Image (cartoon, rainbow, N blue to C red):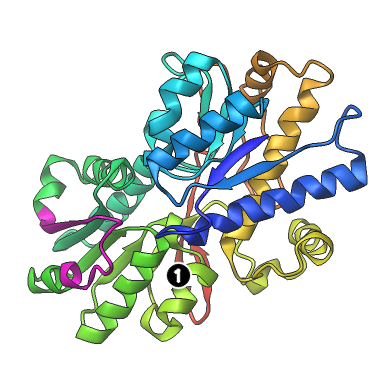
Amino acid sequence: IGNTVPYSGPASAFGVFGKTASAYFRKVNEEQGGWGGRKINFMSLDDAYSPPKTVEMTRKLVESEGVLLMFNQLGTAPNAAIQKYMNSKKVPQLFVATGATKWNDPKDFPWTMCWQPSYQSEGRIYARYILKNMPNAKIGILYQNDDYGKDYLKGFKDGLGAKGVKLIVDEESYETSEPTIDSHIVKLKASGADVFFNASIPKFAAQAIKKNAEIGWKPTHFLNSVSSSIGATIKPAGFDHAQGIISSAYLKDPTDPQWKDDKGLKTFNAFLDKYFPEANRNDAFVVYGYTVAQTMVHVLKGCGNDLTRANVMKQAASIKGLKLDGLLPGITIKTSATDFAPIQQLKLMKLEGETWHLFG
């Protein structure tokens, strides 16, 4: 199984996806002998969130290493750079770690499938909440200037509708090459916005939370789920600066005391004890890596001895109501030949103290 993920660079917080999956596949190899008498050889390379590197490394893994499939590669732009290549080669590009809506296109790209809820769906959810609860809001938006940020922006504006879009007073986009987004935050405050929709990756999300506090800007802050990790974003930004932020979730938060006796998270913690003891247990990205790796193993088991690439895609597109340790109660994984979006539900949550509290 091949993988690229940023172990370095501006999105290195996501490197833990690869580390967690690697540990989970090691567990499957040691405890179950892999499956069907075969061990999983997981080859994970650092692409530093750079699309040209993703292309180079993916080609190496597919053509030189002969991987069966590519799994959970991170980032909208990196995955977009290899999508046509993967489909022309008929190699599964499975459970990509990005919520761009374009991954759910089985007609045009039958070898590409996402995993997490789409950014557009999530954007619509926040917009609807704002229209219902803050009909006179003045909205300021920060988004990453690529397919990832623009997908959130589109969903958010779609959710607001023609009338609601007039509530937007400023839109600021940033490049991942910028060292800081401080100047964008200053502009957003100056716009008079009292609602802030923050569609950024963890590094910049933490900067935004800190800068808001520094300049005394206290809007109702909506933070995209990509950056909602306590360990990767909230703690580095400072809990006192992040109170009241609203986000959304489909995974259990390992820091939330309500899951203290949860069977799924007990299994997850036992896995960490044995196979990934150095993991930051406050990092929701570890739960993500574990849960998506469980999904991958479910697909491999469904393949039986027929380990062709075509059968891998057939099994990935035949998941019916799969419950996993890390998913919130009531959220299941479902796919079909015409629906390549495995998770389509989210729950809103608000930061209180040092944990997220689910509501609505």
- Could you tell whether 356 is left or right of 123 in the image? right
In the foreground, 57 or 148: 57
- Could you tell whether 55 is left or right of 323 in the image? left
Q: Residue at x 73, y 70 (%)?
A: 260
In the foreground, 168 or 39: 39
Any part of residue 306 in sight:
yes
From what the image shows, is residue 333 above or below residue 11?
above
Q: Residue at x 13, y 48 (%)?
A: 165
Q: Quadrant of residue 274?
A: bottom right
The residue stretch that appears in magenta: 167-185
| Location of residue 320 in the rendering, given as x and y in whole percent from the top left corner | 67, 28
Any part of residue 360 in sight:
no
User: Which residue in the protein does label 1 denote?
Assistant: 233
From what the image shows, is residue 71 above or below residue 355?
above
Q: Quadrant of residue 29?
A: top right
| Location of residue 241 in the rendering, given as x and y in whole percent from the top left corner | 36, 82
Q: Residue at x 41, y 78 (%)?
A: 237
| Location of residue 85 in the rendering, given as x and y in whole percent from the top left corner | 45, 22
